[in-house]
Amino acid sequence: MKTYLKITLLVAVNLFSCKVNERNIQKKYEKSEITINLKKNNIPASYFNGKVTDLITTEPIIGAIVRLRSMDGTKNYGALTDMDGNFSIKNIDLVAYQLQITSLDYEKVNMTFEIKEHSNCTAEVQLIPAISQVEKPIIYLYPNHKQTIHINLNYAGSLTHTYPKYPDKGWSVTAEPNGTLWDENNQEYYALFWEGKPTKEIIPQDGFVVSGKETATFLEEKLTYLGLNRREANEFIMYWLPRMENNPYNLIHFSSKQYEEQAALEISPKPETLIRVMMLTQALQTNIKIPLQDLSDLKKTRKGFTVVEWGGSLIHTFKEEL
């Protein structure tokens, strides 16, 4: 059994008779792979067939949208991948095409190529998963006495959802020692909420591999160790457990310095205790080997004005190979 970390993914476009004019395969951090082969037909017809799979897991991608559009805009063809990730487009003209392949949760692929003679063009497409969204970080505030608190989130990415709405100058709320929050319109909240897409994924180098059925017990133990109280841990587990307990195994990593650099918090007045629990997790089919994470530097004891944040992100970092 071997484990691989995703560090750099190169683009490979091999072509025989189908002529490639240009390549445009995604961003700096995520690159998909396409291989196109040609077999000449003895009949006056051309076909474009292929298979779309996940580059990390090699599993077929069902329902991916494959579009062919002629460069002059007069011809359009399309297909969806089936249960095995296969697609087929028949009777296409001999012209240059813009190929686009899209699927939910994967990075879009664009490239151009030309069919110069009647042939079967076969494409092997491997898509890299899109950068994962940071899900449901919520922030609890527990001051020593009722007071106004300002929170600025300096996020290296784009915010997709916030509640209450995150203003340009950050949140400003009145907080009570029991955690109750009030905005300037006297609207009550129990926490602040945000989600976002980072510009760059955090790639863990260590962690824990936990069976799905043991995930609840594992999280109860670790979240208590990291400083969450029962209500905070309950909310964390109720959100994440339905997505984890039915997996054969889950890789779990609690990010610290990298996450704090990715989503820096500026809080005024400054809290005496700041607890930030960001879980990175990936569903696994097998029990892979990974260095065990030492959580001792993340352990916090609440003292004075305390701020607590928890959240998580689904990752696609580890490739399993039997």
Image: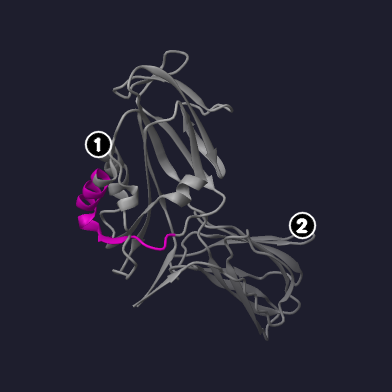
Circle 1 crowding by C-alpha within 10 Å: few under 14, some 14–19, many from 20: few
Camera-nearest residue between 178 and 39: 178
Residue tagged by mark 1?
229
Label 1 SS: loop
State the image coordinates of residue 316 (x, y, percent, origin top left).
44, 60
User: Magenta region, mostly helix, strand or loop?
Assistant: helix
Camera-nearest residue between 7 and 244: 7
Q: Residue at x 28, y 39 (%)?
A: 301
Camera-nearest residue between 215 and 180: 180
Circle 2 crowding by C-alpha within 10 Å: few under 14, some 14–19, many from 20: few
Q: Is residue 100 above or below residue 170?
A: below
Residue tagged by mark 2?
73
Label 2 SS: loop
State the image coordinates of residue 288 (x, y, percent, origin top left).
32, 70
Q: Amino acid at mark 1?
A: Asn
Magenta span has 113? no
Q: Residue at x 65, y 75 (%)?
A: 13
State the image coordinates of residue 238 (x, y, percent, origin top left).
27, 41
Q: Which residues are magenta?
A: 204-224
Q: Residue at x 49, y 26 (%)?
A: 171
Q: Residue at x 41, y 40 (%)?
A: 136
Q: CA distance from mark 1 to mark 2?
A: 60 Å
Q: Is residue 252 above or below residue 236?
A: below
Quarter placement of the C terminus: bottom left
Q: Amino acid at mark 2?
A: Gly
